[in-house]
Amino acid sequence: MPDTTVRIPREAKERLATIAAGEGLSLRVYLVRLADTLLTPRERAERAEQARAALHRWTGYALSPGEERSLDEDLDRRLTQADSPL
């Protein structure tokens, strides 16, 4: 597979190179490993659907779209509170 050049700010490249070196890796190897561990939005959506289907099969539990929205809003609210300084 041919390599490619990606233009990023120097500070970002230096930070990534420092992180990679701290793990004993070259920047190239670090970025390849990083790409292998992250999911695309489509992959995340597919996994979420698989998890919902498995939960329904195992327990019969299935949220309606409204219930899912309500829980998402509650989670967002809690995360905002946890992120706010005291």
Image (cartoon, rainbow, N blue to C red):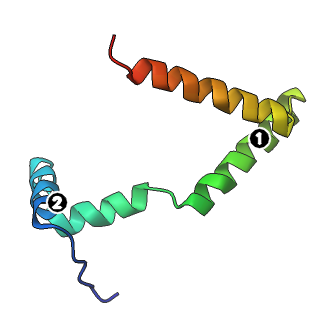
Q: Nearer the viewer, residue 32 or 82?
A: 82
Residue 85 in the image, given as x and y percentages of width and height: 32, 16
Q: Residue at x 17, y 60 (%)?
A: 12
Q: Mark 2 falls on what kind of element?
A: helix
Q: CA distance from mark 1 to mark 2?
A: 37 Å
- Is residue 52 toward the left or the right of residue 76 in the image? right
Residue 33 in the image, given as x and y percentages of width and height: 32, 60
First along the sequence among labels 1 and 2: 2
Which quarter of the figure has residue 28? bottom left
Q: Residue at x 52, y 61 (%)?
A: 40
Q: Residue at x 41, y 55 (%)?
A: 37
Q: Quarter holding the C terminus? A: top left
- Is residue 15 toward the left or the right of residue 30 in the image? left
**Residue found farthest to the top:** 86
The amino acid beneath tag 1 is Arg
Q: What residue is disc 1 on?
A: 52
Give the label, 1 or 2, closer to the camera: 2
Q: Residues within 10 Å of mark 2 (few under 14, many from 20)?
A: few
Q: Residues within 10 Å of mark 1 (few under 14, many from 20)?
A: some
